[in-house]
Amino acid sequence: MISEDLQITAQTARPLIHPLLLPFPVACLVGALLTDVVYWRTAEMMWADFSAWLISAGVILGIIVAVLFLIDLLTGRFAARAAPTWPYAVGCLISLVLGFLNMLIHTRDAWTSVVPWGLALSAATVLLLLVTVWVGWPFIFRREVNVVAREIDVVVMS
Amino acid sequence: MSYSLKAVRRVALVVSAAALLSACSDDSFDPQSQVGADPKLPEPNQYLFPPMHLASVVGWKEGETPTVAAGLKIEAFATGLQHPRSLYVLPNGDVLVVESKAPPTDTIKRPKDLVMGWIESMVTSGGDTGPSNRITLLRDADGDGKPETNSVFLDHLNSPFGVSLVGSDLYVANTDSIMHYAYSTGDTKIAAPGTPLVALPGGPIDHHWTKSLVASRDGSLLYVGVGSNSNITENGMEAEKNRAAIWEVDRATGRSRIFASGLRNPNGLSWEPQSGALWAVINERDELGPNLVPDYMTSVKDGAFYGWPYSYYGQHVDPRVMPQRPDLVAKAIPPDYALSSHVAPLGLTFDTGNSLPQKYQGGAFVGEHGSWDRDKFNGYKVVFVPFSGGRPSGKAEDVVTGFLNGQEEARGRPVGLAIDRTGALLIADDVGNTVWRVTSAAP
């Protein structure tokens, strides 16, 4: 005699690698927004120089995070996750592109390396990062436990 | 360089994205429309990748020379020099060749400085094969264009550029000071250490480092060009103190004052023979596009302000400078004669001799070191600007060309100029490491 039943198993996801380094480029790009604002208010070149270093570091570290993200993707570490990953991935990628453009803007000399386009891009990058990290929060910084219910065949011997 | 630029060896560096972004305006624009008293000034452009195009250095092969205009002849006066940048002819006819290297790299303040430093590290101005920062004396006693004496006149200088002799007092403008030496006619070497007359703005940042020098006619005053410490104030306003100016120095006391200001990088300080006015060639700002801002030559008026950094050609405000200074912009005067954008004029001399063809007499020769920040090369030649009544009286014409070969590689680059005792034009070529001598073709 054959009957149907459900087997419930609990599964912990394998941890993602890229969130290990994610805070670093984010901190650089947030810092650049702050130094951009200070330059905008003071016209003191030191702050624009800080911004240029922070954005360049942010972009380089961002590229490293992107590589780790790809590794996460290719090794299937995202596979078992419940939250959608694509909005998060696209947000990160656009932030990186904005950061790169901003890096080029910041190679200009003096005032127009920041005002208006550098400052605007810095602000847009930080806003987008805020949204992106908020979207990705459930799975990048929390160890998830997924509950999976599967139909299995149970053979009952009579 | 207008960027204190050397050339790149074996590296033709074209940022192709820049080419794409700038090609449109570059191709349709005639650089000749920016030669003369009233240059065409397009709208400024700022780029993500500013145009950058450096000529790879190949040097002069045996027997090669630049090309001269009809009626002229050119020969190498001396070869195998170490970055000859400026020339000075002593009263007895001896020629001083100032061989000079840029001071150590600018302080790295931004990632951009790292990248520019890396580009410059591939740059050797035709080979770094020996000691520079010295003055070599060449004596051609029989006037055949082949010096018999070649002697190290002064050594261990600090990026020297300008030289001026008043009586028996010889002045050398190092990048950080004017030095005084005692000279007697016929000396081929000065061993005694000099004494400083006045300190000039040098390091730690020393962006435009060439200090051009000329003595007043009566010998009581010295005029020295002090270039800006940046392209457009990106090293901070404090770094620009007493820079982008021509100083007047009292020879007896060393006391100095700013004679004229707003001159981004003034060189080739010379007296116009008819009016007796001070003239100079000025390297204008970069990164506003391939056709901005035209470099120029101008008479330099006492107390005048010529715009840098706040504006160019009078009241054209530069958006990159903050805080802006409308009060200074209002009093900025436009220069006399534009030479086209990014040609990098570093040498100026008036034809005060009488052996070159008649048409050149009293006019100005300008040594154009050549562009690096536009796709189509500009400059890399010596031009002639006719003068009459103390003012430019016509269009600049090419006199010495061929510093770039057919593949647009640099065989040499002209810098400082001088008229020698026989009236011939001497040209310092700091990439070809040669001094050229231009004479009349007819004997």
Image (spheres, grey):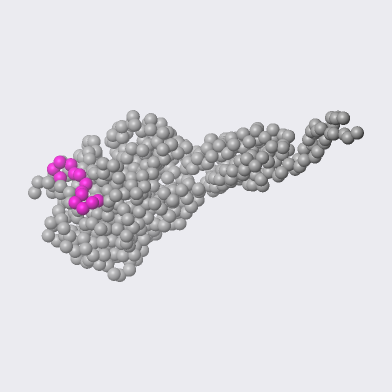
Please state which of residues B106 and B236 is positioned toward the viewer in this rendering: B106
Residue B315 screen position, x and y as percent: 40, 35
Residue B9, magenta (yes or no): no
Please state which of residues B150 and B59 is positioned toward the viewer in this rendering: B59
Note whether A88 is above or below B201 in the view shown. above
What secondary structure is the magenta-colored segment mainly? Answer: loop
The answer to whether residue B49 shows anywhere in this view is yes
Please state which of residues B23 and B107 is positioned toward the viewer in this rendering: B23
State which quadrant residue B404 falls in: top left
Number of on-image labels: 0
Residue B66, magenta (yes or no): yes
Residue furthest to the front:
A158
Residue in the picture at 41% in, 49% down? B119
In magenta, the rendered stretch is B60-72
Dividing the image into 4 quarters, which one contains the C terminus of chain A?
top right
Residue in the picture at 27% in, 51% down? B59
The answer to whether residue B280 shows anywhere in this view is no
Residue in the picture at 80% in, 33% down? A152
Residue furthest to the right:
A158
Residue furthest to the left:
B443
Residue A53 screen position, x and y as percent: 55, 47
Residue B284 screen position, x and y as percent: 37, 42
Residue in the picture at 47% in, 50% down? B114
Please state which of residues A146 and B148 is positioned toward the viewer in this rendering: A146
Dividing the image into 4 quarters, which one contains the N terminus of chain A?
top right
Note whether A9 is above or below B215 in the view shown. above
- Horizontal arrangement in the rendering, residue B40 relative to residue B145 (left or right): right
Residue B88 screen position, x and y as percent: 24, 56
